[in-house]
C-alpha cells in the first residue's frame, strides 16, 4: 500500500506515463476501452489514464520508470544532491572570504584589534581572559599566514566546492558515476571530519559526520557499488525488472512467472 501511494503521489505531481507495446497480448492488458475513450495503464502507479499513450514500440524499449523502492531511492539521491549544492555554495562563499582577506590582511588585523577592546569591559566583568581565548588566538594566527598560503587555501576550497556541485548534478540525474564519486569523495574526508569532531564537539559536526557515514553506506549497499551484493550485474537486473509485465503483476492482472504465460518479463 505504501509503495502504490508513493507512486501515485509522484504521478499526481508529474502526470502518468503510458506506453503501447507492439505485442498484442501485452497491449490488450495495458489498454481499456471506456465510454469516454481509450485508457492506458500507467507504468509507474498502475492506474489507467485516459488518452493516447505517451509512447509505443516493443516492450523491451518501454521507458524504465522508477517505481516503489527505485522511486524512493531517487528521492534520497536528490535529497543528497540538494545538500551537496548547499554545501558547495557555502564553501565557495568561504573561499571568497579567504581570498578577500588575503588582499586586505593588515587592514583586517587592525580592525580586529581595535574592535576587540570594545568587548573587554564585558569579558573582564565575567573574569574571562579575552586576549588568550582559543577563538581569538586562532583568528590571530591567520594574520600571520602568507598571502600565497591563503590563496592556496582559497583555491583548494573552490576545488572542493566544484566536486560537491558535480556530485550534486550527477546524483540529481541518477548517474552511476556520481554514486562512485560521492562515495570516494565523502569517505576521503571522513577522517578529517572525525579529527575536527575530536578537537571540538558540536551538534552540527556530529550531524554532518553521521549524515556522511549514512550516505556512504546507503549508496554502496543500495546501488551495489564496488561489487557489493552482486555488483553492477545484479544492479542492472534489478533496474530492468521494472517491466511492463511487472506493472501488470503489481496490479494483480497477470500471474507471476512460473504460473502460466506470465514469463514474458523483459530482461
Image: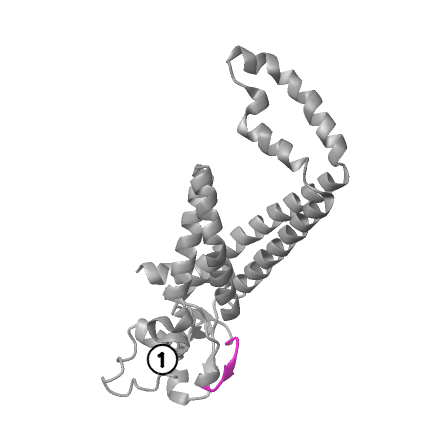
Where are the magenta residues, as a range?
Answer: 53-58
Q: Which residue is drawn at 41% across and 76% down?
A: 232
> Which is the main secondary structure of the residues drawn in magenta?
loop
Q: Residue at x 60, y 55 (%)?
A: 160
Residue 19 vs residue 259, the one in the foreground: 259
Provide the residue designation for mark 1: 245
At which x and y percent is residue 97? Answer: 68, 41
Q: In this view, does 188 lie above or below 137?
A: below
Residue 184 vs residue 74, the one in the foreground: 184
The quadrant where residue 69 appears: bottom left
Q: Is residue 19 above or below residue 8?
A: below
Total numbered labels: 1
Q: Residue at x 48, y 76 (%)?
A: 63
Count residues near mark 1 (Cα–Cα under 10 Å), then give few for <14, some for 14-19, many for 20+. many
Q: In which quarter of the image is the N terminus?
A: bottom left
Residue located farthest toward the left when viewing the structure as drawn: 259
At which x and y percent is residue 215? Answer: 43, 56
At which x and y percent is residue 29? Answer: 36, 81
At which x and y percent is residue 15? Answer: 50, 64
Q: Is residue 78 left or right of residue 140?
A: left
Q: Does the magenta stretch include residue 56?
A: yes
Q: Is residue 32 above or below residue 146?
A: below
Residue 184 visible, this orientation: yes
The quadrant where residue 239 appears: bottom left
In this picture the colour scheme is one colour
Q: Is residue 124 above or below residue 264?
A: above
Residue 208 visible, this orientation: no
Q: Which residue is drawn at 76% across and 31% down?
A: 107
Q: What element carries label 1?
A: helix
Q: Quadrant of the C terminus?
A: bottom left
Amino acid at each position: 500500500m505504501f509503495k502504490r501511494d508513493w507512486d501515485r503521489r509522484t504521478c499526481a505531481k508529474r502526470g502518468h506515463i503510458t506506453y503501447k507495446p507492439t505485442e498484442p497480448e501485452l497491449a490488450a492488458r495495458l489498454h481499456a476501452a471506456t465510454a469516454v475513450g481509450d485508457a492506458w495503464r500507467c507504468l509507474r502507479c498502475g492506474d489507467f489514464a485516459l488518452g493516447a499513450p505517451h509512447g509505443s514500440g516493443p516492450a523491451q524499449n518501454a521507458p524504465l520508470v522508477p517505481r516503489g523502492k527505485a522511486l524512493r531511492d531517487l528521492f534520497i539521491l536528490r535529497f543528497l544532491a540538494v545538500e551537496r549544492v548547499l554545501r558547495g555554495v557555502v564553501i565557495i562563499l568561504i573561499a571568497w572570504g579567504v581570498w578577500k582577506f588575503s588582499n586586505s590582511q593588515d587592514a583586517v588585523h587592525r580592525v580586529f584589534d581595535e574592535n576587540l577592546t570594545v568587548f573587554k569591559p564585558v569579558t573582564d566583568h565575567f573574569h574571562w581572559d579575552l586576549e588568550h581565548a582559543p577563538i581569538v588566538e586562532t583568528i590571530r594566527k591567520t594574520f600571520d599566514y602568507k598571502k600565497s598560503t591563503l590563496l592556496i587555501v582559497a583555491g583548494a576550497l573552490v576545488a572542493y566546492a566544484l566536486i560537491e556541485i558535480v556530485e550534486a548534478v550527477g546524483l540529481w540525474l541518477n548517474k552511476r558515476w556520481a554514486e562512485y564519486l560521492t562515495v570516494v569523495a565523502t569517505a576521503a574526508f571522513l577522517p578529517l571530519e572525525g579529527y575536527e569532531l575530536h578537537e571540538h564537539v558540536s551538534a552540527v559536526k556530529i550531524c554532518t559526520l553521521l549524515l556522511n557515514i549514512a550516505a556512504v553506506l546507503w549508496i554502496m549497499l543500495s546501488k551495489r557499488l564496488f561489487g557489493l551484493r552482486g555488483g553492477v550485474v545484479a544492479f542492472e537486473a534489478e533496474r530492468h525488472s521494472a517491466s511492463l509485465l511487472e506493472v501488470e503483476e503489481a496490479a494483480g492482472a497477470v500471474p507471476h512467472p512460473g504460473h502460466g504465460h506470465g514469463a514474458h518479463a523483459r530482461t
